[in-house]
Image (tube, rainbow, N blue to C red):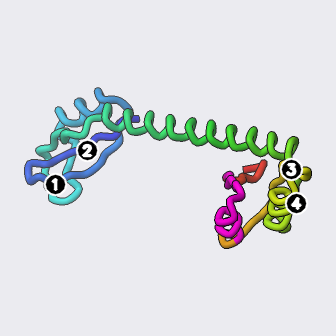
Amino acid sequence: MIKYILECKNKHKFESWFSTSKEFEKLQKKSLLECIYCDSKAISKSIMSPNILNKKEKKTKNEDNNLKKIKKDLNSLRKFVENNFEFVGNKFANRAREAYYDKKNNKNIYGITSDKEKTELQDEGIDVVSIPWIDKDN
Ligand SMILES: [Zn+2]
């Protein structure tokens, strides 16, 4: 299917679908095309070509792939963190402080902080890295 933007002699523009470009030419020759606004039969193709539409579709596809890749990367990041870090849940801020001030206890941890806690930790010179966390199923 090809979508054309059609234009009548009165400059009305409307979209129409054709199975092939030949079908459009056939209908045009037989004056079977009609403006949906003024019933004019003087119809021509507008500037927007099917090529432009195809390009747009391609771009969307690439964006989908990029999104998939980002999700995949985030999933591997999540796996890495889960395997190498200790999950401390809501106690993250406390545990991060313990780890920071007690150098012997310098474990890698991950957990949940509020923005306020995160700012406080950073003010104390504790490195906190936020990573986007995505659901495994998503
Ligand atoms: Zn018209």
User: Which image quarter: residue 17?
Assistant: top left
Q: Tell me, yes or no, whether the two marked residues, 4 and 2, touch with CB atoms within 8 Å.
A: no
Q: Is residue 86 left or right of residue 44?
A: right
Please, what is the three-letter code of the amino acid marked with disc 2?
Ile
Residue indicated by mark 2: 5
Q: Are marks 1 and 4 in contact (CB under 8 Å)?
A: no
Mark 4 against mark 2, which lies toward the viewer? 4
Q: Earlier in the sequence, mark 2 or mark 3?
A: 2
Residue drawn at 71 percent across, 65 percent down: 121
User: Residue 123, image x and y in percent?
Assistant: 65, 66
Q: Which residue is mark 1?
A: 12
Residue mark closest to the camera, 3 vs 4: 3
In the image, which residues are magenta? 117-131
Residue 135 location, x and y as percent?
A: 75, 53
Disc 1 versus disc 4: distance between alpha carbons?
64 Å
The residue tagged with tag 2: helix, strand or loop? Answer: strand
Numbered circle sitting on residue 106? 3
> Mark 2 and mark 1: span between their CA atoms?
10 Å
Q: Is mark 1 within 8 Å of ligand 1?
A: yes
Distance between mark 3 and mark 4 Cα atoms: 14 Å
Could you say where residue 29 lies in the image, as x and y percent from the top left? 17, 32
